C-alpha cells in the first residue's frame, strides 16, 4: 500500500525552528518528485515547495512566502522527505501535508495525513 | 504568479443532482490543471490531472474539461460522500497555485 506519513509538528514560538519529516512506503521513492502543501486553519491549500529526484539533481522550488526560511530535503536511503522551517511566523500555522508527484504525471497524486504546526507565543 | 479563481465559492445541491464547478486561470496554462477533493479534517484526494484525466480509482461520475484559462469539474449523480470541498490547481509554472475552493453542501 502506498503511504506517506508526516511527523514532527508541534507548538513553536515565533522566530523558532521546526523540522518536519515524511516517511514514504509502498512505492519507489526515488522515481518521484515530492511536494509540501499547507493549509492554515479554515483556509484553502497553499503549495509550499518541491524537491526533484536524484536524476534531476535534487533541485528545489519554493513559494515566495517561505523562500529563504524553509528548506526541503530528502534522504532516498531512508525513503524520507524533510521540511526544515526556520524563522517561523504566526502565519506559518497550518497543517502541513507531504505529497508525491510522479515525474511523468505532473501534479501530486498521493498525500499524507498531515501534521499540525502551531506558531504562537 | 498565476491566479486561479473558482466559482462558485459554495454550492448547495441534493443527492442525485449534477453539478459543475468552474476554475479560471489568470493566464494560459495549456491543460496543466488538477482537481482535488477534500473532506474537512482529511487530506486532499486527487481526482483529475491534465484537465480531464481521471486518477486511478476515481469513478466516472467525475469529469473534467477545459484548456488554457477556462476549466470545469462536473459531478453527476451526487452521493452523500461527494459533499466536500473541491480545489483546482495549476502546475504549468512555479509557484503552483490553488483555487480558493468550492464547498459543495447538501
Image: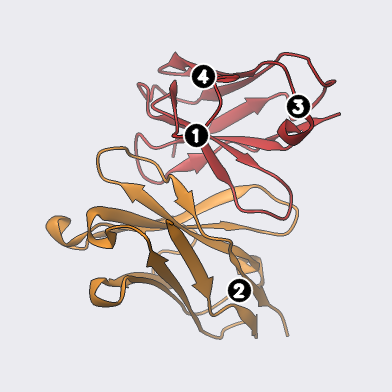
Between discs 4 and 3, the one toward the N terminus: 4
- Chain letter, disc 4 residue: B
Discs 2 and 4 lie in a common subunit: no
In this rendering, the label closer to the viewer, 2 or 4: 4
Q: Which residue is mark 3?
A: B79
In the image: residue B98, left or right of residue B90: right
Q: CA distance from mark 2 to mark 3?
A: 40 Å
- Chain letter, disc 1 residue: B
- Chain letter, disc 2 residue: A
Q: CA distance from mark 4 to mark 3?
A: 18 Å
> Quadrant location of the N terminus of chain B?
top left
Q: Eyeballing the image, is A87 above or below B39?
A: below
Label at residue A89: 2
Discs 4 and 3 lie in a common subunit: yes
Between discs 3 and 1, the one toward the N terminus: 1
Q: Which chain is red?
A: B
Q: Which residue is mark 4?
A: B64
Task: Find out whether the residues at labels 2 and 4 contact each other: C-beta distance under 8 Å.
Answer: no
Amino acid at each position: 500500500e502506498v503511504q506517506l506519513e508526516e511527523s514532527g509538528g508541534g507548538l513553536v514560538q515565533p522566530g523558532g525552528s521546526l523540522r518536519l519529516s515524511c516517511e514514504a512506503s509502498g512505492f519507489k521513492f526515488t522515481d518521484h518528485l515530492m511536494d509540501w502543501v499547507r493549509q492554515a486553519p479554515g483556509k484553502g491549500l497553499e503549495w509550499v515547495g518541491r524537491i526533484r529526484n536524484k536524476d534531476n539533481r535534487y533541485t528545489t522550488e519554493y513559494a515566495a512566502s517561505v523562500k529563504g526560511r524553509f528548506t526541503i530535503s530528502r534522504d532516498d536511503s531512508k525513503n524520507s522527505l524533510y521540511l526544515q522551517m526556520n524563522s517561523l511566523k504566526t502565519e506559518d500555522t497550518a497543517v502541513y501535508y507531504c505529497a508525491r508527484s510522479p515525474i511523468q504525471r505532473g501534479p501530486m497524486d498521493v498525500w499524507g495525513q498531515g501534521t499540525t504546526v502551531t506558531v504562537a507565543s | 504568479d498565476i491566479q486561479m479563481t473558482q466559482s462558485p465559492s459554495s454550492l448547495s445541491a441534493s443527492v442525485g443532482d449534477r453539478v459543475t464547478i468552474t476554475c479560471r486561470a489568470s493566464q494560459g496554462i495549456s491543460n496543466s490543471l488538477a482537481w482535488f477533493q477534500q473532506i474537512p479534517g482529511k487530506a486532499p484526494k486527487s481526482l483529475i490531472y491534465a484537465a480531464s484525466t481521471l486518477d486511478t480509482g476515481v469513478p466516472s461520475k467525475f469529469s473534467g474539461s477545459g484548456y488554457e484559462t477556462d476549466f470545469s469539474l462536473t459531478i453527476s449523480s451526487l452521493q452523500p460522500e461527494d459533499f466536500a470541498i473541491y480545489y483546482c490547481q495549476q502546475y504549468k509554472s512555479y509557484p503552483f497555485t490553488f483555487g480558493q475552493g468550492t464547498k459543495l453542501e447538501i
